[in-house]
Amino acid sequence: MNDAAAITAERAGWTPKVNPWIIGVVVSMAAFMEVLDTSIANVALPHIAGNLGASNDESTWVLTTYLVSNAIVLPISGFLVSWLGRKRFFLACIALFTLSSFCCGIAPSLGILLLFRVLQGAFGGGLQPMTQAILADTFPPEKRGLAFALYGITIVCAPAIGPTLGGWITDNYSWRWIFYINVPVGILAVLLVSQLVQDPPNLAPLKGAMLRFDYIGFGLLAVGVGALQVALDKGQEDDWFGSRFITTLIIVAAVGLISFVIWEWRHRDPIVDLRLFKMFNFASCNVMMFVLGAVLFSSTVLLPQFLQTLLGYSAETAGMVLSGAAICLLFLTPIVGQLLARIQARRLLAFGWITMAVAMYFSCKHIDVLISFKAAAWIRVWQYLPIAFLFVPLTMAAYVGMPEEKSNSAAGLINFTRNMGQSVGTSAVTTLIARRSQYHQSVLAEYTRSPRFNTAVAGLTNRLTHVGLSLYSAHQQAFARMYSMVMTQAQTLSYVEVYWLLAVTSALMFLLSFLLAKNEPGAGGQVPME
């Protein structure tokens, strides 16, 4: 008891040796590098497939392998900190992530590239939660909101600029440079982190502690999360339960994750501290973070996909539509960080969710095949601005009432939840777009029997014969154009429905915001005295 009191007193008076903002920029640089790699390779897949003699379907494993290994490491990062020490673990992750990035760049075949992508995702899995935990410990409570704003800029903006940057690098240099650019950044990060970052005193008793590694728990986690991630990534492509492979993966994932929860809940030294979910506030924040990840990434997928498939935009032009919103977020996020010093996190969250619901409803009312570049860019701005009022306050609210010694485990779980939300959201909207497009196509096809449709075909046939086509060719082309119009309208309706669903989901999270615990503005995760 005396030792615990001494540690608490020492921690209360501890401050880093250098300016916290310098530390914040350095650790955020490492997290930015890792998050960028989740999306920068998307547009380079055709180039990778062609250069390494693989099919386009095989090249998608470049993304899947990274996400699987990343998702497995995220929730166990808190245990690894207790085993190795936070600074040592963070440095190892940066160094090995940088090395595996270089190895990805020089990979001579797809098999070797996938091997190093697994390693890259695994070592990158510790960067996000450790960055968040270091910021929480480095900054005093009254400035923690601004610190999380810096982290929010990193996490939210990196995926937005990834496809645009990846496309530019691939077109002007080579796909290998999307991995090589990590090398100088990683080396610089290792040098700066080794000199600037310190472990706070409350981590000292844990550093080097030889905890028993929970091999069974880790095995169940790896099998469950790995199977689920692959199923989500390949489900729509393989027709979900119409595929024996996907069905098997979902069964394995369900058995593995249920067994993992039961085992970890009863284990003396769990590799993932699931007991944190007994705290209602932390559990609620994880639900919101899951939904935020789903809404954020699904909307990031929806608009470029709509512009490219229906309006013929190039990948670079579609990426430019997203870039303006990311720039606006750069200026808004620090303002939200300052507001956290004056307003309770749950109130900012409520504002963010209702604004997000309105933005998604606005999107479903204004998206159509006649939309201009300017209008699409403004839609994206309205969709993206509420993120500042969600990500930063949500990160803050998750720490309300959280013991300091649990901050590393909490950071790992929060980031894991967000990443799983991203995977589920992206998979869900992709499936919904495909299935609802088929439904609307079947409904619209009924109108082909109406007199108005026949009149439209006759009119179009007449116009085509006047430009030189034979009557038969004109009639066939008129039918083809009308069918193309039906397909386009069916797909557009499916996008409208998905945006409406995102609006409803955001509105439900608005209601949940009021159930979160109060925090003292300017006091970090402290609960106000009643």
Image (tube, rainbow, N blue to C red):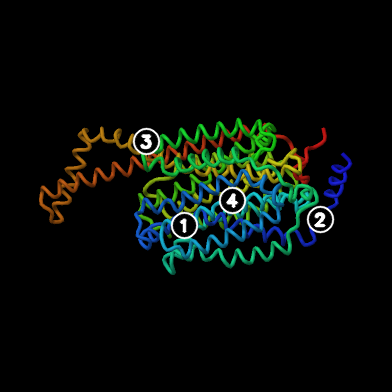
At mark 1, the secondary structure is loop
Q: CA distance from mark 2 to mark 3?
A: 56 Å
Q: Earlier in the sequence, mark 1 or mark 4?
A: 1
Q: Which mark is residue 41?
A: 1
Q: Nearer the viewer, mark 2 or mark 3?
A: 3
Q: Is residue 189 left or right of residue 226?
A: right
Q: Which residue is mark 2?
A: 15
Give percent across and percent down for residue 513. 64, 35
Work out how far the residue at label 1 is from the one at label 4, CA to CA, in angstroms: 17 Å
Q: In 3D space, how far apart are the residues under numbered discs 2 and 1 (Cα atoms)?
A: 39 Å
Do callouts 2 and 1 mark residues in contact (Cβ within 8 Å)?
no
| Residue type for callout 1 | Ala
Which residue was labeled with disc 3?
244
Task: Please report contact status of discs 3 and 1: CB closer than 8 Å, yes or no.
Answer: no
Nearest to the eye among marks 2 and 4: give it: 4
Which of the two discs, 2 and 1, labels the residue nearer the N terminus?
2
Q: Quick one: label 2 or label 4, which is nearer the N terminus?
A: 2
Query: Is 92 above or below relative to 224?
Result: below
The location of residue 106, given as percent across then percent down, is 47, 65
**Residue 364 seen in this snapshot:** no
Disc 2/disc 4 C-alpha distance (Å) = 27 Å
| Local secondary structure at mark 4 | loop
- At label 2, the amino acid type is Thr
Would residue 445 be found to the left or right of residue 259 on screen?
A: left
User: What residue do we see at 78% from left, 45% from top?
Assistant: 523
Horizontal and vertical percent position of residue 269? 69, 38
Q: Which residue is mark 4?
A: 125
Amino acid marked by disc 3 = Arg
